[in-house]
Every structure is written in structure tokens, then in C-alpha cells.
């Protein structure tokens, strides 16, 4: 059932490489090809579970061009220190710096489109193999963009903004327009002409100097007129909202197996879910490039790229046509992004 997956993968990669202006080049680290025995073991686990819970992380989105933190070329390797929740809420200058960087990075990150891993997840869900739910640590919304439903965003979403005073929610795109209006000419004045991909960071922002950020103007909440604005994400040192915590714990308790995909499970909010499943003596599988905190708990640990393995898993379970549809969907999403970028 998996024999044709290489052909469809090559066709997708050919389409991407032949584009005159790729929207977001892949940032996925190099990895070995998956062993057929590991692919078969993953297929067996997915088929045997009645309520399989999928827990995804940054490794699912690096192929879409979104940086991660912990891979060899991730944000941490470049000296990136992510903003802490406490400094964001208590220091106006830190908030200004965050929003200045986010303003520059938004144009880049908003062009990200779901890749074959996201579409493979949707294909598995559509066929009833993810009855335990989908929990993602990613804030990019790409699972939903690929058609997955009921996704639990463990750490929030970057495409939404909340007021820390009144709680009003607004789309991030609307805030971008307000920022542009308040900071006309700021890019040129601050000497920020163009920011290379290497300067993009996993927070959804870009590396800028403090001097460049000092003159940036940040609006307050349009609903209450005075509240500071924050993306609806859980920053480092912050607390996951209680409702999300309870929903994730309930999903882990109800699952009869968990598949970790594209995550080192370094955050406690994610690790405790895997730990709960393991403590209940239920199967844990990990698919990730490099080691994972969950490896000691896993009955199956596969070091390979989710963006190739998950489509191959769909093909192994449902045939070449199903896998081909995954790659076609990914190619179409990328093509739309490039068309938008060239306008």
C-alpha cells in the first residue's frame, strides 16, 4: 500500500522548487527516511486505538516555514530569548518592543500555509482514526486551515488579540491595520527595509534592535479605550487558561493511546498529558526529528520528518489515491500562498 508514496512526494517537491518566488521555504531539519518497520508499527497503533489522541508541536509547521525553538537551527540556536509573560504585562517598553517586532514579522508569518503533515492529520481525522482528539502546542492555526475540526489550541492562537483589561477579542489582521496607520513611515525611519528569513523567530516576530523599536506606537484596546493588547497565546512563564487545561486533561484521560507528532514535549503543559496516558498503561508513540522528553514513556519512538511520514501513513492505510490527495492539497495551499505573495 505504501509503494507509490515517493512518486507523489517528488511531484510535490518539484512543484515547490519550480515556483519563481516560494512563499515560505521549509525550515524542517534534515532527517533520515522512515524505516518500513517503523511505518508499519505506527499504522498498527493508529488502527488498533479506539480513541487515539494526537498531540502535535512545532515540528509539524517547520515545513510551512515557521521557525521552532529547539531544533539545531531553531530560535534558541540563534540566541533568541522569548518574551516572558510577566515582562509583557508589567513593562510597557517590552510590550512596545514585542509589537514592533510582531508588526514586522506578521507579513512573513501570515503567508504560512498548511503542509502535507497538516493535511494528513485532517485525512486521518476524516476517516475516524483520531477519535481521541487533536491537541496542538502550535499557535499558527494551520491544523484548522487544513480542515481539521475540534482542534484544542493548548497555547492559544497568534491570529487573535485580547485586551488584558476588558477581555475583548479582535482579529490580529485588524490590529495590523491599526499598527500600520499609527506607524506610517516607521519602517523607513527605523531603518527596517527588509528582514531576512533568518531573523524570523518562533514567537511570530522578527529580530529588531531596541533602538528601532523605541519610536513604535502601540494602540490600546478599541473597546474599553485603555487596556493593553496581547496576542491570545500563552507566553513563557504564563498560565494556560483553566478551561483549556481541563479539556486537555479530560482528552488524555479518555484516550486509549497517544501519538506525539513533531514535538520534543519540553513544556510541562504537554508532557503531563503524555505522562497521564503512560501512567494509565496505554500506548505512547512519538514521531519527531531528534529526541523527545516523552521517549522514555514511549513504546514506539520514530525519528523522522512528520511531513513525509504522516502522508505515507495515510497512503499505507488507505492507498495511493488517499496519499496523492494529501500531497495535492499541500501543493494547492502553497500555490495559493505564492500567488498572494506575488501580488
Image: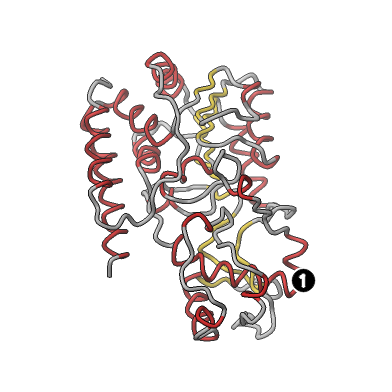
Placement of 73 over or under 335, stated as above or below: above
Question: Left or right of 315: which side holds 97?
Answer: right
Question: Left or right of 36: which side holds 222?
Answer: right
Q: Nearer the viewer, residue 168 or 61?
A: 61
Q: Secondary structure at mark 1?
A: loop
Placement of 301 over or under 157, stated as above or below: above
Q: Nearer the viewer, residue 219 or 154?
A: 219
Quarter of the figure that contains the N terminus:
top left
Identity of the residue drawn at 32% across and 59% down: 337
Image location (x, y in percent) of residue 28? 45, 40
Question: Left or right of 135: which side holds 126?
Answer: left
Question: Left or right of 94: which side holds 134?
Answer: left
Q: Nearer the viewer, residue 250 or 326?
A: 326
Q: Residues within 10 Å of mark 1 (few under 14, many from 20)?
A: few
Identity of the residue drawn at 55% across and 86% down: 182
- Which residue is the site of mark 1? 91
Placement of 229 over or under 281, stated as above or below: below
Image location (x, y in percent) of residue 175? 52, 76
Amino acid at each position: 500500500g505504501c509503494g507509490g508514496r515517493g512518486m507523489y512526494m517528488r511531484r510535490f517537491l518539484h512543484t515547490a522548487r519550480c515556483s519563481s518566488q516560494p512563499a515560505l521555504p521549509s525550515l524542517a531539519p534534515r532527517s533520515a527516511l522512515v524505516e518500513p518497520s517503523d511505518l508499519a508499527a505506527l499504522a498498527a497503533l493508529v488502527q488498533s486505538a479506539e480513541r487515539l489522541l494526537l498531540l502535535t508541536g512545532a515540528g509539524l509547521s517547520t515545513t510551512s516555514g515557521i521557525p521552532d525553538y529547539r531544533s539545531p537551527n531553531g530560535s534558541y540556536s540563534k540566541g533568541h530569548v522569548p518574551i516572558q509573560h510577566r515582562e509583557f504585562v508589567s513593562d510597557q517598553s517590552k510590550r512596545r518592543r514585542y509589537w514592533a517586532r510582531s508588526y514586522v514579522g506578521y507579513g512573513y508569518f501570515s503567508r504560512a500555509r498548511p503542509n502535507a503533515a497538516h493535511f494528513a492529520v485532517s485525512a486521518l481525522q476524516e476517516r475516524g482514526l483520531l477519535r481521541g482528539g487533536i491537541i496542538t502546542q502550535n499557535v499558527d492555526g494551520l491544523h484548522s486551515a487544513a480542515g481539521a475540526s475540534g482542534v484544542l489550541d493548548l497555547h492559544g492562537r497568534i491570529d487573535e488579540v485580547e485586551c488584558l483589561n476588558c477581555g475583548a477579542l479582535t482579529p490580529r489582521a485588524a490590529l495590523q491595520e491599526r499598527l500600520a496607520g499609527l506607524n506610517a513611515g516607521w519602517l523607513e525611519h527605523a531603518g527596517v527595509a527588509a528582514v531576512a528569513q533568518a531573523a524570523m523567530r518562533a514567537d511570530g516576530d522578527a529580530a529588531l534592535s531596541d533602538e528601532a523599536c523605541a519610536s513604535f506606537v502601540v494602540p490600546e484596546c478599541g473597546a474599553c479605550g485603555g487596556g493593553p493588547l496581547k496576542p491570545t497565546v500563552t507566553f513563557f512563564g504564563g498560565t494556560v487558561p483553566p478551561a483549556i487545561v481541563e479539556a486537555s486533561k479530560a482528552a488524555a484521560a479518555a484516550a486509549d493511546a497517544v501519538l506525539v507528532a513533531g514535538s520534543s514535549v519540553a513544556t510541562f503543559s504537554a508532557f503531563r498529558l503524555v505522562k497521564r496516558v503512560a501512567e494509565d498503561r496505554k500506548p505512547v508513540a512519538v514521531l519527531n526529528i531528534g529526541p523527545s522528553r516523552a521517549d522514555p514513556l514511549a513504546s514506539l519512538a520514530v525519528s523522522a520528518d512528520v511531513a513525509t511520514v504522516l502522508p505515507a501513513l495515510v497512503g499505507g492505510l488507505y492507498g495511493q489515491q488517499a496519499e496523492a490527495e494529501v500531497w495535492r492539497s499541500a501543493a494547492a495551499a502553497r500555490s495559493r500562498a505564492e500567488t498572494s505573495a506575488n501580488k
